[in-house]
Image (cartoon, rainbow, N blue to C red):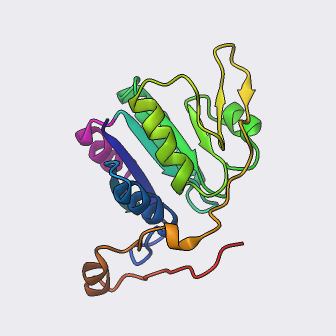
Amino acid sequence: MKSILVAINSKYVHTALGLRYVNEFCRKNAIEVTLIEETIQTPLLAVLAEITRAKPEVVGFSVHIWNKTYVYSLIELVRKVLPAAKIVVGGPEVAFEPERIFNEKSEIDFIVQGEGEICFSELLKALKNADDKVPAHIAYRDKNGAVQINGGVTVVEDLAELGFPYPDLETIVAENKIVYYECTRG
């Protein structure tokens, strides 16, 4: 199953720590995911072209205060161009009020609640296996359109479970980008 994660950073020098962790956790667990990192200054159609060239079945977005409007516009375009693709969102702007978010953006299929490494990878496995059971910590609409919260927010308790989010560290440093790193959460 072709899956991509789309990070829309506020500036070129920034890197998307959250989606880099999700990407590495998936890779570490033999789940193929491609990470696309762009900025809010990148033209929407350029990012859409990059997404559509990948021909994904699942497109994941991280939504933050600085990129919400941009990401929501991008989601609308992705839904028009790739109507069968599953659209998954996570991040601080969407994780805690799924009913409101589904009302704001009907194009969204799933909302990751809390930390996304484990539950996003489990969602990808379920989608690949055509499993109707949505993993815990993923909000979704059921067949009747009702929002299902499905377990609330998840937290990774042992950061050692996560892979190092910068397998491309030398490139990031050479490009003078910021390297974020977490030693604790919460």
Nearer the observer, 115 or 52 = 115
- Identify which residue is drawn at 62% across, 63% down: 156
144 shown above or below 140: above
* Location of residue 179 (image quadrant): bottom left
- Identify which residue is drawn at 76% across, 44% down: 97
- Identify which residue is drawn at 35% across, 42% down: 3
Q: In this view, does 79 lie to the left or right of 141?
A: left
Nearer the observer, 5 or 30 = 30
Nearer the observer, 167 or 76 = 167
Percent position of residue 162, x then y: 48, 67
- Identify which residue is drawn at 66% across, 25% down: 141
Quadrant containing the C terminus is bottom right
Reply yes or no: does residue 15 show up in magenta: no
Say if residue 39 shows up in the picture: no
Q: In this view, does 126 lie to the left or right of 44?
A: right
**The magenta segment:** 40-56
Nearer the observer, 126 or 19 = 126
Percent position of residue 136, x then y: 65, 40
Q: How many numbered markers are drawn?
A: 0
Percent position of residue 148, x then y: 72, 30
Say if residue 153 shows up in the picture: yes
Percent position of residue 168, x then y: 28, 74
